[in-house]
Image: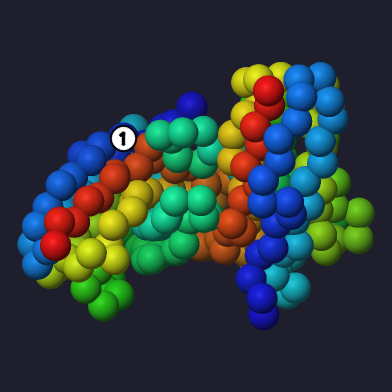
Amino acid sequence: GQQLNQSPQSMFIQEGEDVSMNCTSSSIFNTWLWYKQDPGEGPVLLIALYKAGELTSNGRLTAQFGITRKDSFLNISASIPSDVGIYFCAGQTYNNNDMRFGAGTRLTVKP
Amino acid sequence: DTGVSQNPRHKITKRGQNVTFRCDPISEHNRLYWYRQTLGQGPEFLTYFQNEAQLEKSRLLSDRFSAERPKGSFSTLEIQRTEQGDSAMYLCASSFGLGGYTFGSGTRLTVV
């Protein structure tokens, strides 16, 4: 089952608004990643974070790796209709070869 | 680089039949992963290969599931005696070392 708690489960926002979602875990991760998934497709990597406290941007997206290594957040600024989709956080440790995913945040952007 | 390719995209099968899915990873990636995703959930890890060696298997991977990567390139995932609970999206991903994976578009399995 899922080890990551992702919130909120869903968001309905107006085009142009900023969005924030986060992910927490009871376990420490060495890498935090954020993916976006469109219907019928596989997840696409948005941002990867490799160091506690790291703040990384990719266009209108900004993500941070929490200091405790047990959380991460993703912000989307000035949302546009094509931001619609499901956003997943994922965590990875050096000891595990697999990546654990949250249950996702479904984003709807109203034009 | 054409990304990770999965075939077929969709598969409908009757309960009890065997199915096989194929994944072609990015050519220079040595690691290959299989995940399963059900509706409303994130992907769940099934198994992982480094080159041709299967190094880890999840408890989700019952005896009816088998995966191979015979030459360290493409991989197959076979499900024997399918059950309705096997209906899901099966995702393949590849990477070179640790870090972000590149996922394929998945194979959606429906067991009727």
How far across and how far down the image is residue A90, in percent? 42, 49
Q: Tell me the kind of residue under disc 1.
A: Asn
Q: Residue at x 21, y 73 (%)?
A: A60
Residue A74: name its quadrant: bottom left
Q: Nearer the viewer, residue A53 or A81?
A: A81
Furthest toward the right, the residue is B70
Q: Residue at x 71, y 19 (%)?
A: B83
Position of residue B33 in the picture relative to residue B20 (left or right): left
How many dots with numbers? 1
Residue B48 versus residue B81 in the image, above or below: below
Q: Secondary structure at mark 1?
A: strand
Residue picked out by circle 1: A5
Neighbor class of circle 1 (other Cα within 10 Å; few <14, some 14-19, many 20+) is some
Q: Nearer the viewer, residue B7 or B25?
A: B7
How far across and how far down the image is residue A28, in percent? 38, 42
Residue A52: name its quadrant: bottom left
Position of residue B76 in the picture relative to residue A37 (left or right): right
- Residue B40 in view (yes/no): yes
Instruction: Look at the image and tell me in which quarter the C terminus of chain A lies.
Output: bottom left
Q: Chain of mark 1?
A: A
Q: Nearer the viewer, residue A72 or B35?
A: B35
Q: Residue at x 19, y 56 (%)?
A: A109
Residue B2: name its quadrant: bottom right
- Residue A67 in view (yes/no): no
Residue B88 versus residue B90 in the image, above or below: above
Position of residue B9 in the picture relative to residue B40 (left or right): right
How far across and how far down the image is residue A6, in percent? 29, 39
How far across and how far down the image is residue B91, in percent? 62, 48
Q: Residue at x 91, y 60 (%)?
A: B71
